[in-house]
Amino acid sequence: MSKFDKVLAEFANEFSSDKYLPPTVTQRTDPAYFLLHDGHTSTPITEIYRESCYICRDPEFAQMGLPLCYKCSKCGGHVAADDSVCDDCGHDQLEDIEDDLR
């Protein structure tokens, strides 16, 4: 087992008892594994970090350069990368796009 694999395994074990969904550790056999080493990364917005959000908690999302959670256009709150509705005020970010298209 390589040093990298050991660190990822330790990370997974640390969160395995977490009350939320555990972060996944990408294995070398995963077709997306190359994203961990291609040099493209995303920068999380630390002001909106949510411990209850699996995207915020899993460092592989940023390391792979995937879209991350972002600030709500109305209140500046947390909007999950895989959603469009703000967790704080309930505003749907898709409404902003629809308004811009009009």
Image: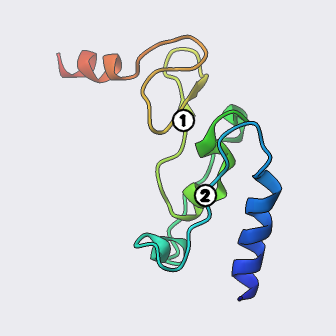
Q: What type is the residue that disc 2 sits on?
A: Thr
Q: Residue at x 59, y 44 (%)?
A: 55
Q: Is residue 34 above or below residue 73?
A: below
Q: CA distance from mark 2 to mark 1?
A: 21 Å
- Using the image as rendered, state which of residue 35 and residue 24 is in the foreground: 24
Q: What type is the residue that disc 1 sits on?
A: Tyr
Q: Position of residue 75 (x, y in %)?
A: 58, 15
The quadrant in which residue 14 appears is: bottom right
**Looking at the figure, which quarter contains the N terminus?**
bottom right
Q: Position of residue 73 (x, y in %)?
A: 49, 21
Q: Position of residue 42 (x, y in %)?
A: 55, 56
The furthest residue to the bottom: 2
Q: How packed is label 1: few (under 14 Cα within 10 Å), some, or many (20 or more)?
A: many
Q: Which residue is mark 2?
A: 24
- Using the image as rendered, state which of residue 7 and residue 64 is in the foreground: 7
Q: Is residue 33 above or below residue 24?
A: below
- Give the secondary structure at mark 2: loop
- Using the image as rendered, state which of residue 23 and residue 81 is in the foreground: 23
Q: Which residue is mark 1?
A: 70
Q: Position of residue 67 (x, y in %)?
A: 47, 49
Q: Earlier in the sequence, mark 2 or mark 1?
A: 2
